Image (spheres, helix red, strand yellow):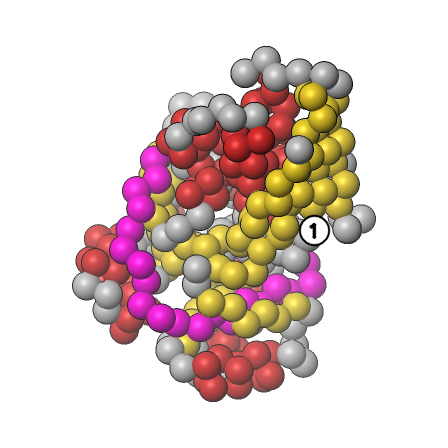
């Protein structure tokens, strides 16, 4: 038995972290959405045998228990005592270590896929709770739709569909370590924004106000370590984006535009400066 699941990239339209929990993990207050840049995850289940095998079309990813998709399969196998060999093939299109949640989305795809293959009949809420054991972005990726995300990532509140917009994603030629950036956060020094303003704009489907109230407090942290991230953000704005910001802990920056002609102009202007540039729609 086999199944193929789409694993879309995520973007943070808004990201704030007000404090750390006693266990050291950040409290998140985020608005996340999914875009049509995606990995494709083929999952095969062979009954009676045991083991997990991961194959990818890139040399950048581990194929063992460090891989989040591998961890997703192992957790479901152990929790629900399923005797089956799982073979996972990941066709990567989302850049690695980019702040786009590729690994988390692959893990979420494995949870959704095995839930179907093994007839576990688990709800998305239950899958999201299991996903939190893997990574804080997995619960959102289980849903893969615009949502308000709180807590350690486990509270996912679906929001209204966003107004039509084009998204230009620019990934500079550098990788950012999420644990390193998180270790550099001084919560009291961050300039926190008000998430209610953008939540209200989404509720009203007001494109202009969504652009006005977007924000990512971690730009202040990553930007200090990697100034080129802020340079790309400024370029995207100069080239005509209605808003631009970093996604996650970076280094990827994205800009939004209401017209495809303007978005294409931004893409063409960026190509000389940026390693990887994508033009996508929000799902």
| Residue at (53% x, 53% y) in the render | 8
Q: Quadrant of residue 256?
A: bottom left
Q: Quadrant of residue 250?
A: bottom right
At numbered mark 1, what does the secondary structure look like: helix, strand or loop? strand
Magenta highlight on residue 174: yes
Residue 84, x across and y down, in percent: 68, 21
| Residue at (75% x, 45% y) in the render | 56
Residue 15, x across and y down, in percent: 39, 51
- Residue for badge 1: 91
Q: Is residue 283 visible?
A: yes
- Is residue 264 depicted above or below 154 in this figure? below
- Judging depth in this view, the residue of 82 and 207 nearest the camera is 82
Magenta highlight on residue 278: no
- Judging depth in this view, the residue of 123 and 66 nearest the camera is 123
Residue 86, x across and y down, in percent: 70, 29
Q: Quadrant of residue 207?
A: bottom left
Quadrant for the C terminus in the image: bottom left
- Is residue 194 depicted above or below 164 in this figure? above
Residue 17, x across and y down, in percent: 38, 43
| Residue at (61% x, 71% y) in the render | 277
- Is residue 118 depicted above or below 170 in this figure? above
Q: Is residue 243 visible?
A: no
Instruction: Write down the region rendered in magenta.
Output: 154-179
| Residue at (56% x, 60% y) in the render | 37
- Is residue 261 depicted above or below 136 in this figure? below
């Amino acid at each position: 038995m086999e199944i193929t699941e789409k694993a879309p990239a995520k973007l943070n339209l808004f990201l704030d972290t007000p404090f750390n929990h006693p266990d050291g993990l950040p409290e998140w207050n985020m608005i996340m959405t999914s875009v049509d840049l995606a990995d494709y995850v083929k999952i095969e289940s062979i009954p009676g045998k045991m083991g997990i095998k991961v194959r990818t079309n890139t040399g950048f990813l581990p194929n063992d228990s460090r891989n989040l998709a591998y961890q997703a399969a192992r957790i479901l196998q152990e929790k629900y005592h399923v005797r089956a060999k799982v073979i996972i093939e990941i066709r990567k299109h989302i850049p690695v270590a980019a702040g786009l949640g590729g690994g988390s989305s692959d893990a979420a795809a494995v949870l959704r896929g095995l839930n179907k293959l093994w007839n576990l009949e688990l709800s998305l809420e239950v899958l999201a709770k299991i996903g939190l054991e893997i990574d804080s972005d997995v619960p959102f990726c289980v849903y893969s739709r615009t949502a308000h995300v709180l807590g350690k990532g486990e509270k996912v509140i679906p929001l209204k569909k966003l107004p039509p917009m084009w998204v230009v994603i620019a990934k500079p030629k550098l990788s950012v370590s999420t644990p390193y950036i998180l270790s550099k956060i001084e919560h009291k020094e961050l300039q926190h924004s008000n998430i209610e303003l953008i939540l209200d704009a989404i509720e009203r489907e007001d494109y202009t106000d969504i652009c006005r109230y977007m924000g990512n407090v971690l730009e202040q942290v990553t930007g200090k370590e990697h100034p080129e991230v802020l340079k790309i953000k400024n370029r995207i704005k100069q080239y005509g984006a209605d808003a631009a910001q970093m996604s996650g802990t970076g280094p990827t920056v994205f800009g939004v535009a209401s017209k495809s002609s303007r978005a294409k102009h931004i893409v063409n202007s960026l190509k000389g400066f940026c390693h990887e540039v994508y033009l996508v729609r929000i799902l």
